[in-house]
Image: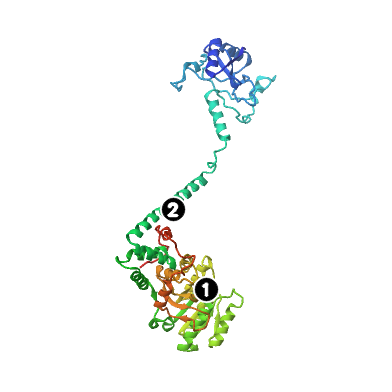
Amino acid sequence: MTVKRFFAESAREALRKVKAVLGPEAIVISNKSVPGGVEIMAMSADSLEALQAGGGPAQAVPAPRADAGSPQAGPLPLRAAAAPTAAADESDDYAVTLSARARAPQPAPLWQPWQPPRQETPAAAVAEKPKLRPLPPRQTPAAPGHDAVAAALAEEIEAAPLPAGMQNGEAQVQQLVEEMRSIKSLLERQLAGFAWGDMTRQAPERAQLFGQMIESGFSGQLARRLVEELPADMDIAAGRNWLAGAVNRRLRTLTAENDLIDRGGVFALVGPTGVGKTTTTAKLAARCVVRYGADKLALLTTDGYRIGAHEQLRIYGRILGVPVHVVRDSEDLRRTLGELRGKHVVLIDTVGMSQRDRMVAEQAAMLARAGAVRRLLLLNATSRGDTLDDVIRSYAGEDIAGCVLSKVDETAALAPAIDAVVRHGLLLAYVANGQRVPEDLHLPHRSYLLHRAFKQPAAGSVHRLRDAEPGLLMPAQAAPQGAALV
């Protein structure tokens, strides 16, 4: 057997050497990449015939052991010249033909590692089948040349670190979105400044009235809407009166003829913590006792969480001569309301909770399952407009009978509360301006409320806008969810 080794810078040159030395029917035994080029081991067709004649069947032809770093797969031809599936665009230099005997139809030999020959009888050799074992992991590509270069490039790309900012695609997209939003906001504010300057030149009265509404505490949405509807050729004084009238037309309030106490029914006072629900319940109870007597009123409380909460209501009940019932759940509430069916007014003091607490929805469901219970929402007049919007959205529902503005005496600007009531279309039932029971609870007085709402900050106040600052508030904003401008 003649096995020769050929070395060249490329696979093409190595195969040409094999073809020139051993002929076109040479058998390629192995090929691997080596420093500086490619190494191919091959033998002639005559050597293969001699090996088959002297060494037994073709399946027993020993193959050279593959190195750990070279996964060659035994003596296999690189390509048959007469194969019908050969690619048409490949050069003939890569075709090494086999002899007729090598191309004879025979079962494909199974590859197995080389082992030293064993002295066995043919029967024992046939009876014992070779045990297959898994191939070693592939370290380098089998075919040198283009495949080796491609594999090396792939490994290099995978090992190379990504550029800064490209390691997390999702984070990059999020950063891009944030930058686009920032650019959009800057453009809106810049265009708003241009619009403000144009309005100041063409309609200085409107610009000044818009700035005054913003200074008073009205939202940009309501202020823009009303200023856009302002008739032309109005001076500042007439424009202020027109804006106050526009807010007055949109403000829904109770009057003495339709007081909730006169209507009667079951009312539950709801709202965030510290808004004054227990005190307002006592004020409404005192109004009812004065008009209809203590036997026409019943007080209930669901506040079993705060220490002494129901005791405070019991004290008011003893003063008014009205019993106070403590209920724990919806079933208890339904049963108690059934027993108090003959009362003219039933007032329920509920647990105060944050508008962002999931218990708000559970509380509303408990009251809804109890029967015909209407809710009165208490709003803190000292809160910001966005906080009031958050409270109204959380407690909103068809069973809201109206709202009560509490702590009116403590706020410096009443415009945010009036603005929220107007935009959400709520019915303003009562106004509370102190702790005294029952003196500090009143039906809404429109003139007083509008006067307080349009009151300007003091001349030296840091909350007054300067120069073109109102123009920064001009970018259009979407109406809050649930808002109902009329």
Quick check: 84 left or right of 168?
Answer: left
Give the distance between the C-alpha atoms of the residues marked 1 and 2, in whole angstroms: 36 Å
The extreme right residue here reads 119
Nearest the eye: 156 or 473: 473
> Label 1 belongs to which residue?
275
Label 1 crowding class (10 Å Cα cut-off): few <14, some 14-19, many 20+?
A: many
Nearest the eye: 102 or 448: 448
232 over 176 or under it: above or below: below
Instruction: Please state the horizontal and vertical placement of residue 299, each as a whole percent of the image.
Output: 52, 82
* Residue 242 placement: quadrant: bottom left
Instruction: Please state the horizontal and vertical placement of residue 409, each as a whole percent of the image.
Output: 49, 76
327 over 466 or under it: above or below: below
Tell me the kind of residue under disc 1.
Val
Disc 1 is placed on an element classified as loop
Who's the residue at 53% across and 28% down the image?
Answer: 150
Residue 180 seen in this snapshot: yes
Task: Indicate how the structure is coloured in the image.
Answer: rainbow
Disc 2 is placed on an element classified as helix
Residue 477 seen in this snapshot: no
Tell me the kind of residue under disc 2.
Ser
Instruction: Please state the horizontal and vertical placement of residue 126, each as a whole percent of the image.
Output: 63, 23
- Closer to the N terminus: mark 1 or mark 2? 2
Query: Which image quadrant: the C terminus?
Result: bottom left
195 over 16 or under it: above or below: below
Who's the residue at 60% across and 25% down the image?
Answer: 71
Label 2 crowding class (10 Å Cα cut-off): few <14, some 14-19, many 20+?
A: few
Numbered mark located on residue 262 in the image: none
> Label 2 belongs to which residue?
185
CB-based contact (under 8 Å), mark 1 and mark 2: no
Q: Nearer the viewer, mark 1 or mark 2?
A: 2
Query: Which image quadrant: the N terminus?
Result: top right
Nearest the eye: 454 or 26: 454
